[in-house]
Amino acid sequence: MKNLAFKQAYQFFLERNYDSSMVRAYQYLNQDNGDKQTEDYCHYFRGYALMKKELYKSAMHSFSLISPNCSFSLLVHLHAGEMALEQQDYEAALTHFLEAEPRMLKKQINMGILYHNIGVTYLHQEKYDSAEVYLFKGLSHHEFAKDTSHIIGSCLDIANLYYYQYLDSLAIPYFEMGYNLACKFTDIEMKRNSAFNMSIVEENRGNMQKALEYRKVFEKWKDSIVDENRVWEMAESEKQVIANKAKSDIALLNSKSRAQAAQRSLFLFTSIFMFVLTIVFFWFYQVKRKSNRIISEQKRSLNALNATKDQLFSIVGHDLRSSVNAMKRNNVKITENMNQQNYEQVEEVFRSNAEITSTTGNLLDNMLNWAMLQTEQLFITPEPINVSAIIEQVTHNYASLMKEKRIKLSSTMPTICKGYFDIDSLKIILRNLLDNAIKYSDSESNICIYSNGREENAISIIIEDTGEGMSADELNQISLQMSSTGVNTAEFREYSGFGLRLCKMLLERNNGSIQFESEPIKGTKVTLKIPIHE
Amino acid sequence: MNKINVLIVEDDSSDGEQLSGLLNENGFHVVAIAKTNMEALNAFSTLPVDIIIIDIFLNGRPEGIYFAEAISAMGEKSRPFVFLTSSKDRAIFERAKVTQPYSFLLKPYNDLELLYSIELALEKYYDQQATLTGSSANALVGSDHLFVKHKRSLKKVLFEDILYVQVEERYCTIHTVNQQFVVFISLIKMASILEGSFIRTHRSFLVNTSKIREIRISEDSVVLDGDVTVPLSANYKKITKNLTIIS
């Protein structure tokens, strides 16, 4: 433990951390059983530290505690002497120096400083002779050592020695020597002191000019010290400024780069956003264009349908009007003939009326069915049916009319003829076909209904009449009428092709088909194809 | 053979009268003409009814549909029906689909169409498609009687009037005292429908026990009312043991 304290003290001393060294040394000294040599060292550490602090009394006390025959007593004496000199205790100083002298001689260390110090002490004691001796001893040692700064110091002190004795002539050369050496030397303190001395000297000699010069030099060195300090300070502050500037530059650059990065990312985001926006707009534009195209197409087809409807309206109105007019005429005829009691004529007119009523009724039925089909009010449900039975039911209604017109109907359908169709659709189609057959047949003609057997998945029902028949042109017109957009010209037939158009639509919905064959005068043959299964 | 009982539900008097006349002409028996829903339900519960002809629109509302729905919810007691309507309303159609199978008749109609739709309704109800309307058979098996087509008119034959049933291939011939009808049903199904008083005397014969007059075991035959003889095969001789013979 105690060794640790000493070790630390020694360490701190070497590091010139004199305070810590002193503390550790004190720690060591406080312990009881320390060995004398180490204690000596500790005292020395303490004393040296105190000396550095200029606490000379305490330092001297510490040094005095050191045993006189320690290995470093030389140092002790030297320091003690110096301190004594500082305290102006010249007697003590001399004692210490003279103690040190032999020791130094033994060790052959440079005595210059020692001799100089002794000389200075004697000088202070005004023992000029002894001072002279020792000062010159010191100078010679310094010259031997080529220690320029100490040489200057010695010169100056010797000069002062003579000066105090008013031996100016002896002093001045040494002042000059000191000054000249100082000029060549770098130590500004020396320069200053030597210049100052010279100025005093010249002043005392009465050389005011020279004195002023030397004074100026002194001032210059004094200033230059200040200047030097100031320069150093300025350099330091300049350095600081530059450092600060560099720092601020860096900060600026950093913020600049950050701003740039932010700008770049902002730019990137904006461009991506714009791109996305462009794509979105483009997509919307495409959608709009497509819907516009669809809309214009729908408009076109709607316009076409409307035109068709209007034309059909006019044609149907025309048909109805002519029917009603015919009946009006017939009524007039009836009254006339009743009055004239031409009962046979009356019968004939009645027959005509019956036919007109039937046809008109059929036309109205067709109109209603067509309208319901268009507005989705007609519900078509194909189901298994007995086609023969349906045919029988439809022809039943025309029995009286055909009898009146003396048209012979022969149906050679088998009792059972299976098909897959919507009952009411089949009835509408059959009514239309029968209606046409009767309309365009004269008296004493035949209408045959028969089946052509089955082929693949359909059966053929044929309605054949021996009526007026149609020309090739008229056949073409029929196929045109049955297509959705064709509207016939009023010239062709007295009656609109409404019924056939309706038949076509119903057949399509039921998976059936229709075919026309006709020859003028000979008659018309209509083939219906009815599916058998689903 | 008996007449088929028809219930008419129609609010228009002249239409109802005309329909009634048509049915009577064709050998049907009209039990009532109901003008409202309530009347119809009343009539249905009190009178014997085989089939109902309903006008969809009663007093401006599709009450005919409600009645049909009420009927079809009665399970065993329900009956087939024919819808009459002057227009084909889609909504009505959809609504009407909710009820059991039916047939549809548009006004104006002729008697052929009426008969046809009655036949269709029966076929759909008893799930014997194309029996009356189109096949070589001419009878439809109902719950306690047959529906038969006899010279254009539709009649019913009570099971108790059947003498015997003879099976040939895929159909059966039903014999009454004076007539015979063909039905497209297997003998086994026939037996299950007829149940009760009918027994098998032969692989191909089903006999109405209440019509047996004589059992001639030695001659392997059974004599029925009307002097009709039916064979009795060896396998089925034991059935005679189950019968109580009165002299």
Image: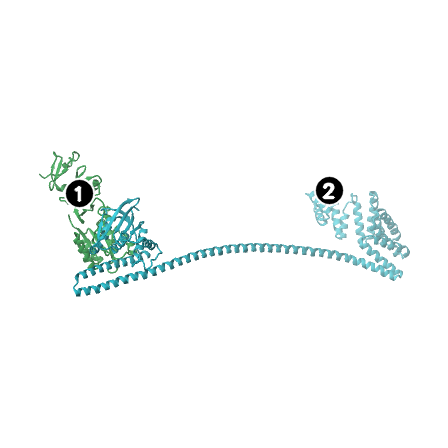
Amino acid at pointer 2: Asp
Coordinates of residue B212 in the picture (x, y in percent): 12, 40
What residue would you read off at disc 1? B174
Chain letter of the residue carrying label 1: B
Locate the N terminus of chain A and report the quarter of the image it occupies: top right
State the hue of chain A. cyan
Say if mark 2 contacts mark 1, CB within 8 Å. Answer: no
Query: Marks 2 and 1, how far apart in space?
Result: 152 Å
Residue at image coords 26%, 63%: A325
Mark 1 surroundings: few (<14), some (14-19) or many (≥20) residues within 10 A? many
Residue at image coords 60%, 55%: A260
State the hue of chain B. green
Residue at image coords 16%, 50%: B3
Coordinates of residue A343 in the picture (x, y in percent): 17, 62
Coordinates of residue B195 in the picture (x, y in percent): 18, 42
Residue pushed farthest front? A521
Which label sits in the foreground, 2 or 1? 1
Amino acid at pointer 1: Ile
What residue would you read off at disc 2? A35
